[in-house]
Structures are given as C-alpha cells and as structure tokens.
Amino acid sequence: MPVQIDYGNCLQDSLGPGHGLRQEELTQIQPALRRAHRLIRQDTRRGKIGFLELELLEEDARKMYRQVSRLGKRFENFVLIGIGGSSLGAKAIFNALCPPYWNHLSPAQRRGRPRFFVLDNIDPVQTQALLRHLWGQKTLFHAVSKSGTTAETLANFFLFLDCVKRQTKNWRDHFILSTDPEGGTLWEFAQTEKIRFFPIWKNIGGRFSVLTPVGTVSSAVLGCPLAPLFSGAKAMRARCSTPNLLKNPAALLATLVYLFYWKKKTIHVLWTYSQSLWDLTEWALQLLAESLGKKTRNAEDCVGPTPTRCLGVTDQHSQLQLHREGPNDKLFWFLSLQRLPSSPKIPKMPGHYLGNHPLAKLFKSEEMATRIALTQSERPNLTLRIPELSPRSLGELFMLLELATAYLGPLFQIDPYDQPGVELSKTWTYALMGRKGYEVERKKLAPWIRREQKPKHIV
C-alpha cells in the first residue's frame, strides 16, 4: 500500500460551514494547478529542478555506496558536519531506518557500523563536549555545505580537522566532503588535499537534497538500503505525474495548504505519531518555511504558512488544549503509521482497564481520539497514512513533500527554490567576523554594534 492522504476532515461535511472546504473550491483551483503542473514539467526539462532526476541521482548513489559502505565498518564513530538542509535529511533517514538508541547498541547489534553524531550547530559547549568525547577514537567525518562556504560548517570542520591532524598522519582517510563542485572552500580543499569527495548538483537546493550525497552518504556508512528509498520516491513521482487533483497526492496536499491559508489557517502543525519520524518533521519544517515564506512577485505582499510540529502522544499533554480551544488558525497534518512494529503488552492488573492491552493499541487509540477531538472542535486536519516504517515509504514521503512545495510556489506566486531572506544575516556575520571584502558592511554595522554593546533600555 502506498502513502495516502486522507483529507475528509478538511471538508465542510466533517467541520461544518466556515472552517471546512466546499467541493467547488477544490474544482475551482484546478486551472491554477494545471498551470503549476506545466511549470514544474518545463522547469524539469530545463534542468532547474534536479531533485526530480531520480534515475541520475540513484546512479550516483549506487557508485558512492560501493565505496562508502565498506568504509563505514573501519570506524567506531561517524560525524556529519552540516547545518540546515545539509544535515536534516540525513537525520530524518537515520532516525526512521536505524533502531532507536543506536549509539547505545553493541557493535554486533549495529552490524559493525559506527555510532552516529550530527554536529549541526556551533554552540561552543556542545562542540567542545563532542571534541573531548571523540578524542583518540577512530572517527569518520562527512562535512557538507552546498556552497562550500557555510561559516558554521567550516568552523566545525576546521576544529575537527585540526583535532584529527594532531592524532594521525593518515588524517585524509577520516574525511568525506560534499559540496558544489564549481568552487568554494570545501571544493578547493578536497582538490588540493585529495580528500574523498561526492558532489551536490548545482540545480538542487539544500532543502531538496536529501537524495543526494547529503543524505545518501550517511545512509551508506550506516548500512541503510538506498534502492527502496529511491523506488519509493520514483513511485510517488509517477503518481504525481497527472494534473488531475484527486489523483495527484502532491497537488492535493498543495491545494489544501493553499486554500486553508486564505481561510486564515496560516499555522500548520505537523503531528507525527511515530517517534522515528520526528526528525522527518524537522526536515519538513525547513522545506516549508524556507521555500514558502517569501515576498510575492509584486514585492509588496508577503506570504507563507508557518510550520510547527507536535509529537504524539507527548504533546497531547502540552499543546492540545491550545489546539482545541485556542485560535482556530491552524491546519493539522497527522503522520500516521498504519502498521506499528512489535509492541509490548501492558501487564494484567486486577480491575484496571489498561491491563492485557498492547501498548500499540493505547498509542493508536490516543491518535484516533485526538483526531476526532480536533474535528469536533472544527479544526481542519488531514492524515498522511504511512503503511509502515520502511525505506520505500520514507522515499514516498520525501518526494510527496518536495513536490507539494514545488506546486505551492506558482500558487503563491513565489520562487520556492531561493532563500533571499537568509542572505542578510550571513552578510552581517561575515562583516562581524572580519571576512575580507566586507569592510563596507562592517562600517554600516557600527551604530548597531554600539547599540548591542551598550543597550539603553534594560529593566
């Protein structure tokens, strides 16, 4: 069974007038969807949308896998150094496909594969702790930056490069680099030092790069199968090849997001009922936020649903009160596993209703109860029905969410593949750090620096 979208709780029949969608609204948007569909096909033919070229990506992954899979068994630890789109996809694959508490398993239980760490921040306390933890151990590093110049990635890379150089003459064997092969610090370093290197295509942005070396290298090191991941992505791409709304899952999901946005449901809560998919929701948050939060093409209006996330059942006890009785400004996405792995049974307790029930039954009952409660409170919600936790289903989810984002770009009249709002803070960071060529920007910052250093309004 493929990944499916159940959108019955988005319709007026379930929610009543005012908050649900009418069938004619789904029909009226069809012409705009067909235009979006044509634009995606045109951009793909022009080579603008590289994440849809799955056959080429799979061939790259197959060649890489043969090299890297054997390499993974030589090391005790594997560290991914990246940030944003350069780490979130790999984390999503790892947490979905590797057993929970992976780093606490024995080497035999990990099938000889290394422990896995992700360094996706420059918090000095956390970084220093990891430096101390890995000192003197056999560690493989994968440094990832699409541009090859990302300040946070380079800072952490330089720290661990220095660490490894001081421990072994064969330091080059401890590193894999991935970046755009057309320039940047990482690319130049890989060429100069003859470091193992896997390129990221120029026409694939970071948040769409999960099926490039950004996500596949760590999968190979950890022994996760890649063929079913790609087969799932290709199956979803095929299902989304029709412009017919009701038969195209990505177009349908984009339609729901778009129509509810103009009904003032501008906050989208991704509520996963699988701890193993928690990092997938973090990946999806970046995909949606960075792709859709934009100024429109007339440069006057600003659009973009605000994504956030919940974990079932944990956040029923922290956020459900707000979601049921607070502002009705949200669309809920349930990520629901249809087949859970084996479940322990709650011990039989005399006279207690929980006794002798599988834990999975309580888990699924709470999911169903939450969905019903939200619907009764006129809160629109859809359910992504995921047959099982498998590489194929994960590939389907990646492609579904990426393609839905691609459809939403033309609907909102924005470019979903750029991120101009991120660039200014990068420029100011370069200026503050004294990067050559940013002296003018440093002068512009002078009054702001003084304000930061000597704030006047403090209570």
Image (cartoon, rainbow, N blue to C red):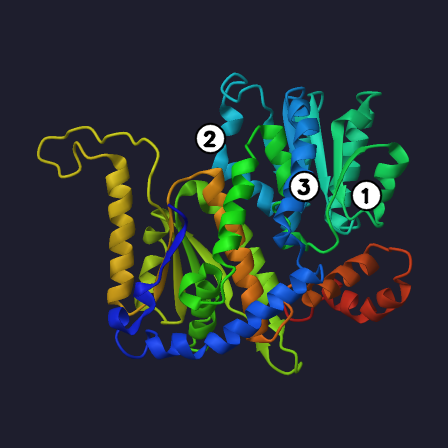
Count up the numbered dots.
Answer: 3
The residue wearing badge 3 is 213
Figure check: 349 above or below 267: above
For marks 1 and 3, the one nearer the N-term is 1
Q: Which of marks 2 and 3 is nearer the N terminus?
A: 2
Amino acid, disc 1: Leu
Q: State how far apart marks 2 and 3 are (Cα).
A: 22 Å
Which amino acid does the dot numbered 2 rest on?
Pro
Question: SS of the residue at dot 3?
Answer: helix
Residue 130's disc is: none
The residue mark sitting in front, 2 or 3, is 3
Q: Residue 99 carries which label?
A: 2
Q: How crowded is mark 3: few (under 14 residues within 10 Å), some or many (20 or more)?
A: many
Q: Name the spot of residue 27 as percent of width and height, x first.
A: 40, 76
Residue 220: horizontal and vertical position, in percent? Answer: 62, 31
Q: Determine the image quadrant of residue 199.
A: top right
